[in-house]
Image (spheres, helix red, strand yellow):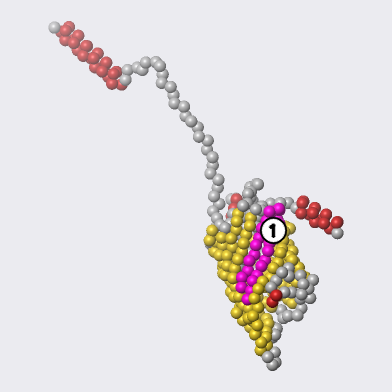
Amino acid sequence: MKKVVIIIFLFLSFNSVFSQYTKIINSKRPGFSESPYGVGTKVFQAELGGFYNNNNNYKGTFLTKDSYGGNLFLRYSNFLEKLEINLDLSYQKDNRIFNNIFISNQKAYTGINKLTFGAKYLLYNSVYKDKSKEIRSWKKKHAFDWNRLIPSVGVFVGWNSNFLSKDYKAPGMSFKGAILLQNDINERFVILTNLVVDNILMDQIQYSYIFTSTLAVTEKWSIFGEHQGIFNKYLDTEYQFGGGAAYLFTDNVQLDISARTSLIASEFSSYYIGLGGSWRMDGHKEKHKSTDALEGTKEPFFKRIFKKNKGKKRKVKKIKIKKRRKSKKSKGPSFFGKKKKKKNRRNKKKKRRKHNKD
């Protein structure tokens, strides 16, 4: 055990550190997938939303209607740039109608149905070339960078606590693990891939995958599409399809809306609607110059593309021009003075000629 701890410590210590911080908020919402990147040191972020879910088929055991609630996701980073700690909390209220051959019984469930403490760490950051500086060849400047097919990689480890309401208590605590991948296909299009194992150490262990594609439309708006597959030993395989949009209200506030439906046993069994927002308290201070997104740092899925590359203004030293001192020597006659002297000479010559004639 000691050897394992030492190996992990050395791995974390020698892995290169760079800034994951971005000037605008980088939120997990509104999709269910998660990026391998953290929020950056000295940053606290809260992501809050409400949802409504209508489920009309669950293994033929009960019918759930009018299920609604809220979700709170808290994120914080302080110790390492690549490490983020988070908390995932959900509160839900639903009405379940249990059906069997003889009886149809209705019950209401209310309370905290999810409380997960987790940590996320970036293992590998994919680096891309900055082609904006390529001026010699148009073809090279617009050619696809095949390094973009190599994803950035992160890992997530979480603890599903059993500090839940009575109606949602599990047989015991469990754990959650995930591999998080991100590909920046180009400056506007990003693909996230999550491979998740949930309810570890429980009999109801669950495997799932999530694919999310995000497109930056403008500086403020982005849209996304998502597909998720859920596999459980005792339940039918479930496939979910969803989409939505996000709006950047300010650099630290994002608003979002989403919808999804699920397919179980070749039948559409439910639909889901979510609405929420994200807010961050930014206390980050850069110790060094942050690298550009194309050089490998993560950026949010919108605004980074349309931001104009404003070059730094060239600093020009102001040179004070010294005024020439006036010469102490007396100035010569001016132009009009010279003209006047010539006129006087002419007049004198005329007088002499006239006097000589006489």
Residue 70 visible in the current orientation: yes
Q: In the image, residue 34 lies at what x, y percent?
A: 67, 65
Residue beneath the point at 83% across and 54% down: 6
The picture quadrant where one finds residue 203 is bottom right
Disc 1 element: strand
Q: Which residues are magenta?
A: 69-93
Local crowd size for mark 1, using a 10 Å CA cut-off: few (<14), some (14–19), many (≥20): many
Query: Left or right: where does residue 91 sit relative to residue 247?
Result: right
Q: How many marks?
A: 1
Please state which of residues 20 and 192 is positioned toward the viewer in this rendering: 20
Please, which residue is most extreme toward the left here? 358
Residue for badge 1: 84
Q: In the image, residue 303 lies at what x, y percent?
A: 56, 59
Judge whether residue 80 is colored magenta: yes
Please state which of residues 175 and 182 is positioned toward the viewer in this rendering: 175
Quadrant assignment for the N terminus: bottom right
Residue 292 visible in the current orientation: no
Residue beneath the point at 74% across and 77% down: 232
Residue beneath the point at 58% across and 60% down: 279
